[in-house]
Amino acid sequence: MPVLEPEETIVEFSHKHYVRRLPATERPRSKSREKSVSSLEKNEDFIVTSNLTKTDRTLVVLTPNGKAYPLKVADIPSSNPKDRGTPIVGLLSPSATKDSTDRALSEITIAHFILPENSEGVDLVTLTQQGKIKRLPMLEFAELTNRGITVVKLKEDDRLRSASLSKVGEQVAVATTGGRVLRFDVDDEQLPPMGRTAQGSQVTRLRKQEQLVGCVTLDSEDSLVLFSELGWAKRMPAGSVRLTNRGEIGTQAFRFAEPSDSLVGLLRAVPGTDVKLFTTSGRFLRSTIDAIAFWGKDAAGDRVFDLNPGEKIIKVVSSQ
């Protein structure tokens, strides 16, 4: 049989962890820069990321138990823009769901990325729920098979929280519910490369009843956007957060306007990106990064949306 040449294609991932493959001609449309409020329907979904890639590439899917599984882009069913796509977990090997029987299918995947063609110098930065952070060289993925590989060793009561690709020279920003942000360099001193079975190092000291709410990789010229449970938000240059060492307490980057408030989300502020906010009342709020004003670290920012009495924002998701 003749060998087919790799073709350009668009792979899109949804909030509910569906994936679809579209023709390369189906480029994403430009988005409205207005804010909006709408009710979140039970089965409503939306596209989170859209990647232009090729059919000979490999998608890597990470699960809460710290494992990675491969999926060939060519094995993702071809769709049209009106189709929802296919659940990612339905395309993975049975090993991906074997240890997650107590979770809904939409909760089995934590992150996903296209495996770089040249992995030299590229790392995967992982953060667990209990604050263990680690830098894993992408060369460790050379042995990736359908059975999956371990990317981080977890304690029984811990789980993988986030993961993103990075390189030496970039930076990591981590935020807590108390409004603290810790920013440090990605290098051999702050984040030494570790093997697949290492647990990682403690990223920061958490105060009583304080939790991690976000971890992003970025350049020093980038900006951050922060959201609070009671609907306040602001953008701020990453450089306004003091560059420090991993393990320290960081900078108080969010001054709450109300004592009962707490931080709920941290994102890298990519211009033109949509932000989706989910509330305890089942509402679905949308804004663009561009609609959120810049404020200094000593400000609470602006109230982006008025919430109902007792209503809080519980989740923040970016959509590129």
Image (tube, rainbow, N blue to C red):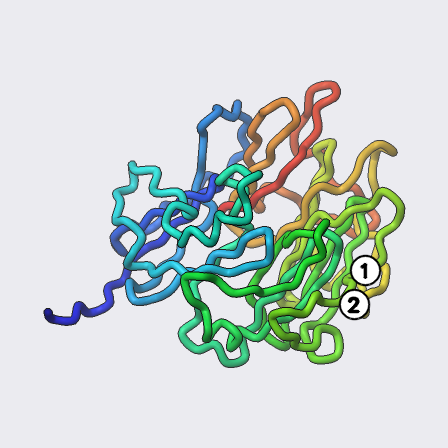
Is 177 located above or below residue 115 in the figure? Answer: above
Give residue 268's quadrant in the image: bottom right
Q: Nearer the viewer, residue 31 or 207?
A: 207
Residue 51 percent across, percent down from the top left: 39, 57
Label 1 secondary element:
loop
Per the model, the C-alpha gap separating discs 1 and 2 is 7 Å
Q: Do the residues under discs 1 and 2 have CB atoms within 8 angstroms?
A: yes
Outermost residue on the top side: it is 309
Give residue 307's quadrant in the image: top right
Residues packed near mark 1 inside 10 Å, few (<14), some (14 to 19) or many (20 plus): many
Any part of residue 277 in sight: yes
Is 201 located above or below residue 280 in the figure? Answer: below
Q: Which numbered dot is residue 127? A: none
Q: Which numbered dot is residue 204? A: 1
Q: How many marks?
A: 2
Is 214 located above or below residue 203 in the figure? Answer: above
Q: Which numbered dot is residue 246? A: 2
Residue 317 percent across, percent down from the top left: 57, 43
What residue appears at the point 36 percent right and 53 percent down from the top-left corner?
Answer: 11
* 295 horizontally vs 109: left or right: right
Give residue 135's quadrant in the image: bottom right
Q: Amino acid at mark 1?
A: Thr
Is 279 located above or below residue 76 in the figure? Answer: above
What residue appears at the point 28 percent right and 62 percent down from the top-left corner?
Answer: 55
What residue appears at the point 59 percent right and 51 percent down from the top-left corner?
Answer: 64
Q: Amino acid at mark 2?
A: Arg
Q: Nearer the viewer, residue 84 or 46?
A: 84
What residue appears at the point 53 percent right and 75 percent down from the top-left corner?
Answer: 140
Residue 173 percent across, percent down from the top left: 70, 60
Q: Which sits earlier in the primary sequence, circle 1 or circle 2?
A: 1
Any part of residue 320 in sight: no
Quadrant for the N terminus in the image: bottom left
